[in-house]
Image (cartoon, helix red, strand yellow):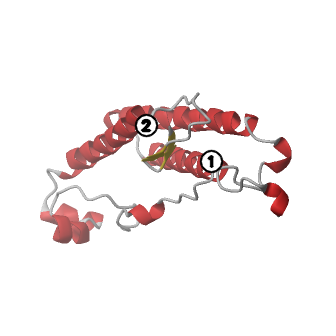
Amino acid sequence: MYRKSHRFIPVPKYSKWNITAASLGTEELAHMEIICAIVHQLTRDLTLEQLEKSGFDKYYVDHTLALWPQSAGGTPWTATYFQSKGDPITDLHEDMAAEQKARTTYDNILRLVKDPEICDPIKFLREREVVHYQRFGESLRIVQDHLDSKNFYAINPEFDLNPKCR
């Protein structure tokens, strides 16, 4: 199976995958659950004055203290963040970039926060992003090993079956 942005596309030619659809999707949802638990623990006892002073008041007006996935800048999460081209090389690079972006976000949190109750789970999540990046890199190598190395970026072998027509 080939994973892209939590959607799975069967790729029968490449049966040796080291990231399975079920395990990775489950783990990514668990990451979100951990982050939501941290946010909940940090905000559940805030007074209205603390909400205003922290800038959390706008969030509070829309969501009270419910969890609502959004960026630190307030942009709500949306599926439009996903990119998928149907080309294994392109999509694996996209997956690898997403893992690196998550790792960088965790690095930035660790620079700002010193509380071990927050840092320890963030460090764990950071480690998992590194592992995911490595597994996607291995998957990319498997795909590239099955392609003609002269055509790594010239064709999509799943669709462009007759590259001589180009």
Q: Is residue 73 visible?
A: yes
Residue at 56% in and 41% down: 11
Q: Amino acid at mark 2?
A: Ala
Q: Quadrant of residue 140?
A: top right
In the image shown, does 21 or 13 lie closer to the viewer? 13
Label 2, secondary structure: give it: helix
x%, y% of residue 135?
57, 33
Q: Position of residue 20 (x, y in %)?
A: 46, 32
Q: Which residue is mark 1?
A: 88
Image side of residue 47 versus residue 136, left or right: left
In the picture, which quadrant includes the C terminus? bottom right
| Position above or below: 44 against 28 | below
Residue 95 lies, in percent from the top left, at 55, 48
Who comes first in sequence, dot 1 or dot 2? Answer: 2
Question: Could you classify mark 2 by the number of other residues whose Cα lies within 10 Å: few (under 14), some (14-19), or many (20 or more)?
Answer: some
Instruction: Say above or below: 71 vs 136.
Output: below
Residue 122 x, y percent position in the rendering: 41, 38
The residue indicated by pointer 2 is 21
Q: Is residue 114 left or right of residue 14?
A: left
Find numbered disc 1 in the image and state the secondary structure of the residue it sits on. Answer: helix
Residue positioned 19% across, 70% down in the render: 62
**Can residue 52 be seen at all in this image of the molecule?**
no
Of 2 and 51, the residue lying toward us: 2
- The amino acid sitting under disc 1 is Pro
Q: Is residue 150 left or right of residue 130?
A: right
Decide which of 19, 149 is in the foreground and name it.
Answer: 149
Which residue is at 40% across, 40% downward? 114
Which of the two residues, 123 or 33, is positioned nearer the viewer here? 33
Q: CA distance from mark 1 to mark 2?
A: 15 Å
